[in-house]
Amino acid sequence: MPIVKSSFTARGLFKNGHFSTIYSAKLRPIQKVSQKRERLELSDGDFIDIDWSYSEKKTKKVALLLHGLEGNAQRVYIKNQAKLLTQNNWDVAAMNHRGCSGEENRMYLSYNSGRTEDLKELINHIVAFKTYDVITLIGFSLGGNVLLKYLGEEISIPPQIKSGVAISTPLHLRGALEQLIKFENFVYSRTFVNDLRKKYKRKMVQFPDAMNAEELKKIQNLLDFDNLYTAKAHGFKNAYDYYEKSSSLPLLPNIQIPVLILNAKNDSFLSEKCYPYKIASENKNVYLETPKHGGHVGFHMTNKIYYSEKRVLEFINDND
């Protein structure tokens, strides 16, 4: 223990991992939830934007939501999770990673799967409010790896942080990259590459000495992007050095608060090492749930509520 036996079973077409992934990202209706934006100025001169949603009743609890690769706080999985939380006595701070809020960030570096510094600054900012007694961290995909890495690498965390949930998380980044570049995932990887190439092109205007059209032409897949931009901008030797040093998997044994990792067995983004059964069986704080269905962030029950959203609420309420 604590390997959690999942009660989730998808129905009909949602048993297919690709269908549940695509439907959930592109076709699921977005719940109406109000968001109020706050700009947090960072210590290095850059900024991140936080989209706040508030409980219907006054509360001392807040959930920090972290989106995935090239997402933002307006994505359906963020807003629908925020809706359920605000209906159940939680405030929500949805963090937009650098350059993901609709405005380019100021620096050459941006965000990556293992960069925890911005999350740390946001947590310290919220702790300084002295408004909340309970903080929980909820991450999706890339955001899940960031929060798990933060919890595993910190010797001490603020006592207000009581729990964390990581959904559809690539705990082993190299393995996940090798999965994404397989033919079966061509649609997803091509979408990510197109978005990242556009981002590179925009940043090229800001930083013409560091970025150029010749390198842009060389970016044909995710590995190229991580070699030519991510590694270079964030101080890694190359993409594989970035994957090794940014994966949360080796840090899971260090986690000192309850965390739930919810990874579907039919998530085509994830490799075998993204299902850490041995670690979960040895660390009383790491709860691992691996339902048969769910795809990538696609745990459909109804359009209004997903199993992942229900499990988040259950888990964080049990550990507040």
Image (tube, rainbow, N blue to C red):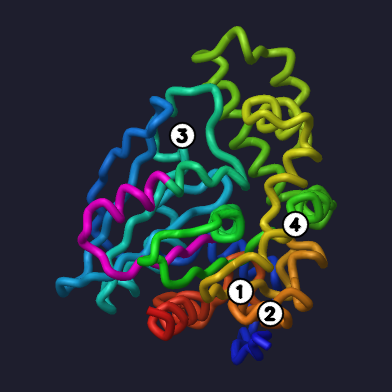
Residue under circle 4? Answer: 172
Q: Is residue 234 above or below residue 17?
A: above
Q: Quadrant of the N terminus?
A: bottom right
Front in this rendered view, residue 7 or 111:
111
Dot 2, crowdedness within 10 Å: few (<14), some or many (≥20)? many
Residue lying at 75% horizontally and 71% vertically, measured from the top left: 275
Marks 1,2: beta carbons within 8 A: yes
Task: Decide whether residue 38 is among the magenta residues.
Answer: no
Residue lying at 51% horizontally and 61% vertically, measured from the top left: 139
Residue range of the region highlighted in magenta in the rendering? 121-140
Q: Distance between the residues labelled 2 and 3?
A: 32 Å
Q: Quadrant location of residue 63?
A: bottom left
Front in this rendered view, residue 212 or 151:
151
User: What is the residue that sits farthest to the top in this orientation?
Assistant: 209
Q: Distance between the residues labelled 2 and 4?
A: 16 Å
**Residue 214 position within the rendered picture, expressed as x and y whole percent measured from the top left:** 73, 13
Among the two numbered marks 4 and 3 on one chain, the one whose residue lies closer to the N terminus: 3
Disc 4 vs disc 3: which is toward the camera?
Answer: 4
265 horizontally vs 93: left or right: right
Task: Decide whether residue 134 is among the magenta residues.
Answer: yes
Q: Is residue 225 above or below residue 295?
A: above
The amino acid at mark 2 is Thr
Marks 1,3: beta carbons within 8 A: no
Residue under circle 1? Answer: 262
Residue under circle 2? Answer: 290
Among the two numbered marks 2 and 4 on one chain, the one whose residue lies closer to the N terminus: 4
The amino acid at mark 3 is Gly
